[in-house]
């Protein structure tokens, strides 16, 4: 961009210099042509008035000079026309360079403005995104916490019921009363194992105390009653023959 601008500026300066020189040459040749034409006019009048060969020769010479000055002026005018065209081209190029410069300067200004605003816009966008994200995350976390609290409450309620049932069973076992379990409440295997472990020693003691005395007397009673029955049968058999003669 800088080199293009320098080239356009130098070309414009060169074209301006060439145009100024050509304009000066045109003015000089125009003056010379005017002088030659005036001389031709004067010599024509003199040749007509005098009619001598010298006057006619001077007139012819003046005409040749006027023609040469006219040709030179035409050549200089052609050069001036070319120089003016080059000057116009240089001016157009310079104008183009200036337009490009202003456009690029405007682009640079827009770029700088965008770069300045970018950080602020990014901060605002991140803030809005963070707010939306936090809002959605809080809602999701609240739902998860609520579900976890519901599960925890359910587990606590079940644990409380199991603990109450186990305490009830333990108290009844300690007091010696029979254990009655509600049909609706089902203890977990772990709780049942614990309750069974607590209640088994008492049950075994009760069965041992009740069973042993009950079985021994029955066996003794059976053993004692058998000889009595046999003895009664023998006495009956012995009494029957004695009763026959009396009849």
Image (spheres, helix red, strand yellow):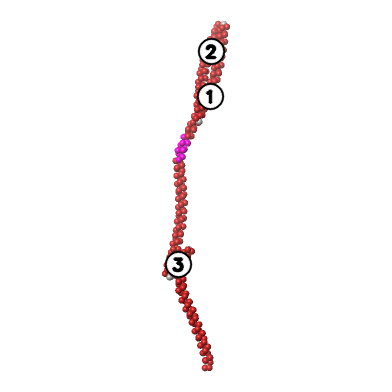
Please, what secondary structure does the residue beneath circle 1 have? Answer: helix
Whether tag 2 and tag 3 are in contact, CB under 8 A, the answer is: no
Q: Eyeballing the image, is 3 above or below 186?
A: above
Q: Name the magenta segment's main secondary structure.
A: helix
Q: Earlier in the sequence, mark 2 or mark 3?
A: 2
Which residue sits furthest bottom?
246
Q: Is residue 188 magenta?
A: no
Q: Earlier in the sequence, mark 2 or mark 1?
A: 2
Q: Earlier in the sequence, mark 1 or mark 3?
A: 1
Residue at 49 percent across and 81 percent down: it is: 223
Residue at 53 percent across and 93 percent down: it is: 245
Q: Which residue is mark 3?
A: 198
Residue at 45 percent across and 38 percent down: it is: 116
Point out residue 221 in the picture as x, y percentages from the top left corner. 48, 80
Q: Eyeballing the image, is 179 above or below 10?
A: below
Point out residue 192 in the picture as x, y percentages from the top left corner. 47, 65
Residue placed most toward the observer, 52 or 184: 184
Give the CA distance from mark 1 to mark 3.
120 Å
Please, what secondary structure does the residue beneath circle 3 have? Answer: helix
Residue at 48 percent across and 31 percent down: it is: 102
Residue placed most toward the observer, 221 or 98: 221
Q: Eyeballing the image, is 42 above or below 206?
A: above
Please, what secondary structure does the residue beneath circle 2 have? Answer: helix
Q: Which residue is mark 2?
A: 36
Residue placed most toward the observer, 114 or 7: 7
Quadrant hosting residue 120: top left
Q: Which residue is mark 1?
A: 86
């Amino acid at each position: 961009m800088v080199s293009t601008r320098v080239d356009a500026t130098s070309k414009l300066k060169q074209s301006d210099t060439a145009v100024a020189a050509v304009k000066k040459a045109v003015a000089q040749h125009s003056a010379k042509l005017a002088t030659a034409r005036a001389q031709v006019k004067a010599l024509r009048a003199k040749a007509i008035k005098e009619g001598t060969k010298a006057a006619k020769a001077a007139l012819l010479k003046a005409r040749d000079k006027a023609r040469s000055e006219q040709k030179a002026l035409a050549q200089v005018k052609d050069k001036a026309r070319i120089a003016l065209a080059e000057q116009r081209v240089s001016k157009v190029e310079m104008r183009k360079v200036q337009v490009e410069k202003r456009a690029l300067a405007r682009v640079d200004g827009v770029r700088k403005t965008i770069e300045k605003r970018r950080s602020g816009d990014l901060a605002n966008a991140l803030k809005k995104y963070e707010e939306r994200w936090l809002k959605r995350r809080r809602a999701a976390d609240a739902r998860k916490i609520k579900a976890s609290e519901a599960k925890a409450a359910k587990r606590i309620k079940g644990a409380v019921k199991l603990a109450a049932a186990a305490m009830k069973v333990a108290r009844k076992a300690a007091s010696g009363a029979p254990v009655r379990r509600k049909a609706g409440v089902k203890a977990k295997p772990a709780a049942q194992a614990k309750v069974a472990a607590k209640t088994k020693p008492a049950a075994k003691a009760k069965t041992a105390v009740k069973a042993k005395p009950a079985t021994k007397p029955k066996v003794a009673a059976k053993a004692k009653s058998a000889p009595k029955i046999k003895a009664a049968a023998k006495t009956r058999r012995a009494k029957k023959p004695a009763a026959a003669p009396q009849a």
